[in-house]
């Protein structure tokens, strides 16, 4: 469970970074 939670957290962080990068490119 801990490993899955850590993977999920890292995945969410990667998605947030990608979204921020897209917004930065748009703006």
Image: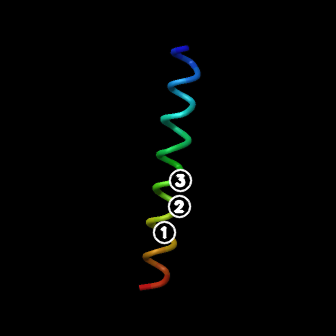
Identify the residue shown where x is 56% and y is 41%: 11
Please name the residue that numbered disc 3 is placed on. Answer: 15
Question: Residue 6 shows which numbered tag?
Answer: none
Q: Residues within 10 Å of mark 3 (few under 14, many from 20)?
A: few
Q: CA distance from mark 2 to mark 1?
A: 5 Å
Residue sitting at the far bottom: 27
Which secondary structure, mark 2? helix
Marks 2,3: beta carbons within 8 A:
yes
Q: Determine the image quadrant of residue 20.
A: bottom left
Image quadrant of residue 1? top right
x and y, in percent, of residue 6 in the image: 51, 26
Decide which of tag 3 and tag 1 comes sooner along the chain.
3
Residue that lies at the very extreme toward the top in this rendered image:
1
Q: Position of residue 17 (x, y in %)?
A: 47, 57
For label 2, the residue is 18
Q: Is residue 25 above or below residue 20?
A: below
Q: Position of residue 14 (x, y in %)?
A: 53, 49
Alpha carbon distance from label 2 to label 3: 5 Å
Q: Is residue 1 above or below residue 14?
A: above
Question: Is disc 2 surrounded by few (<14), some (14 to 19) or many (20+) residues within 10 Å?
Answer: few
Taking the spot 57% from the left edge, 30% from the top edge, the residue there is 7
The residue under the point 56% across, 18% down is 3
- How crowded pointer 1 is (Cα within 10 Å; few <14, some 14-19, many 20+) is rated as few
Give yes or no for contact between labels 2 and 1 (Cβ–Cβ under 8 Å). yes
**Which callout, 3 or 1, points to the residue nearer the camera?**
3
Residue 21, labelled with which disc?
1
Vertical order, 8 against 11 (above or below): above
| Element class at badge 3 | helix
Q: Quadrant of the C terminus?
A: bottom left
Question: For the residues marked 3 and 1, what is the alpha-carbon distance in whole angstroms?
Answer: 10 Å
């Amino acid at each position: 469970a801990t490993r899955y939670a850590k993977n999920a957290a890292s995945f969410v962080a990667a998605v947030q970074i990608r979204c921020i990068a897209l917004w930065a490119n748009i703006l």
